[in-house]
Image (tube, coloured by chain):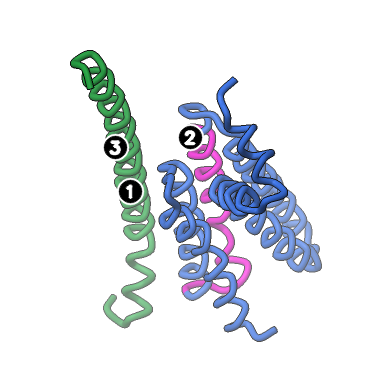
Amino acid sequence: MAPDLQILLWGLAASAPLGLNLIAKRRDADAAGLSAMLLATWCVGRVLGMLYTVPESMTLYPVEDAFCGGVAFVAWRSRRAWWKAALCGLFVLQCCLHAAFWAAWGAGSRQALLFYVAANNLLFALELLAASWGVLSHVAVSALGRLPVFARVFHSARAPP
Amino acid sequence: MTLKEELAELRRELTELKGQVSEVRRFQSWVMGGLAVLGVIGVFLADKFKKLMGLG
């Protein structure tokens, strides 16, 4: 795939959680804030990619992800939701990945770069999914609730005891 | 609607509004915090940008 197309698709993917959270009927400030944070980190990553060459452009990634993990942890502490804990865990994993990559790079392993980029992209995709989980599950439940087969199940689940 | 029922309705609406206000305040703190962090990153990268644009 052409690099320009890849950047365009990643840009769309990075903007999708924020867009979904902003157009949702029941807006969650934390979901929108964390989605905006993910979009901002992606934009900063692209700016660094323009200003520096690989892998120098990636030196700020560990700092960024440690900070984002801290923010996700604070958001989870103030209003608990499993997807915030998952997001925090993904950032911790990403920090471990950065540490492993820079250790391997320092030891002279140049093949580590390909694995690092692929794993970083996978973790970022999972983070985007976690940030949009609330709105996606709400849309799925609403859509299923409209189907006659599931309508009774969801109606009885919502009914007070 | 009796006065008691109206009072209960108003109380329910007030609770709902308080929830909305706290959500807006939370969103506002996200925006302010985000702008502050982006500002700090911008300051760090300012020199590099200036060089790239031939200003420094």
Numbered disc 2: secondary structure: helix
- Which residue, as the protein is rendered here, is positioned at the far bottom? A2
The answer to whether marks 1 and 3 mark residues whose Cβ atoms lie closer than 8 Å is: no
Chain A shown in which color? blue
Magenta residues span A51-75
Looking at the image, which residue is at 66% across and 49% down?
A94
Q: Return the chain for callout 1.
A: B
- Label 2: chain? A
Mark 2 vs mark 1, CA separation in Å: 14 Å
Q: Which residue sits at x=46%, y=63%? A: A44
Residue type highlighted by circle 1: Val
- Image coordinates of residue A148 in percent, x first then y, are 67, 51
Q: CA distance from mark 1 to mark 3?
A: 10 Å
What residue is rendered at 32% in x and 52% in y? B35
| Mark 3 element type | helix
Residue A60 among magenta residues: yes
Q: Quadrant of residue B53?
A: bottom left
Q: Which residue is identified by label 2?
A: A75
Disc 3 crowd, CA 10 A, few/some/many (<14, 14-19, 20+) = few
Disc 2 marks a residue whose amino acid type is: Ala
Marks 2 & 1, CB-CB < 8 Å contact: no
Residue B19 on the magenta segment: no
Please name the predominant secondary structure of the magenta segment in the image: helix
Judging by the rendered image, the residue that carries numbered circle 3 is B25
**Host chain of mark 3:** B
Q: Position of residue B28 (x, y in %)?
A: 29, 43
